[in-house]
Image (spheres, rainbow, N blue to C red):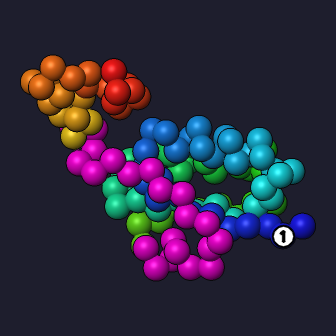
């Protein structure tokens, strides 16, 4: 079975560890040879990257794993790109959830827009 190479864009996100854990759980159905974290914020990504180093060493020892802020390196020889980016970061999320209240709408990203 083919093994895939993926890049996770937004690698410094606090949601990335959950995605990496899911990739470990999917080894039989979605086998991987390489996972790359890519983010423009090296400080945030380093924390998540260190977590990934430990987790993949334990649960996916044959996997090639690294994290980078170099987009050329991140997107080289990949099969899939997972993107989890919030434009404006968490500060913008705060606005996204409060602005709708000014218009008598629910300010929550999971809310049904028809309600």
Q: Nearer the viewer, residue 89 or 110?
A: 110
Q: Residues within 10 Å of mark 1 (few under 14, many from 20)?
A: few
Relative to 45, 99 lies left or right: left
Question: Which residue is identified by label 1?
Answer: 2
Quick check: 80 above or below 99? below
Q: Is residue 98 visible?
A: no
Q: Quadrant of the N terminus?
A: bottom right
Q: Residue placed at 39% from the left, 26% from the top?
A: 112
The image shows residue 68 at horizontal and vertical percentages of: 47, 65
Query: Whole-percent x and y of residue 42?
Result: 37, 57
**93 on left or right of 16:** left
The verdict on residue 78 being magenta is yes
Q: Residue at x 43, y 44 (%)?
A: 13
Q: Residue at x 62, y 73 (%)?
A: 78
Per the rendered image, the range of residues in magenta is 71-91
Task: Specify whether residue 16 is in view.
Answer: yes
Q: Residue 71 at x, y = what percent? A: 43, 73
Residue 77 in the figure: left or right of residue 25: left
Q: Is residue 90 above or below residue 4?
A: above
Residue 13 sits inside the magenta stretch? no
Q: Quadrant of the C terminus?
A: top left
Furthest toward the left, the residue is 102
Residue at 42% x, 73% y: name it.
70
Residue 31: quadrant of the picture: bottom right
Q: Position of residue 4 (x, y in %)?
A: 73, 67
């Amino acid at each position: 079975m083919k093994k895939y190479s993926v890049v996770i864009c937004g690698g410094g996100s606090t949601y990335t560890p959950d995605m990496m854990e899911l990739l470990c759980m999917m080894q039989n159905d979605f086998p991987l040879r390489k996972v790359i974290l890519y983010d423009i914020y090296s400080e945030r990504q380093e924390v998540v990257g260190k977590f990934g180093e430990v987790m993949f060493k334990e649960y996916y020892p044959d996997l090639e794993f690294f994290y980078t802020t170099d987009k050329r390196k991140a997107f080289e020889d990949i099969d899939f790109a997972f993107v989890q980016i919030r434009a404006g970061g968490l500060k913008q999320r705060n606005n996204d959830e409060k602005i709708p209240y000014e218009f008598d709408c629910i300010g929550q990203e999971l809310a049904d827009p028809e309600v």
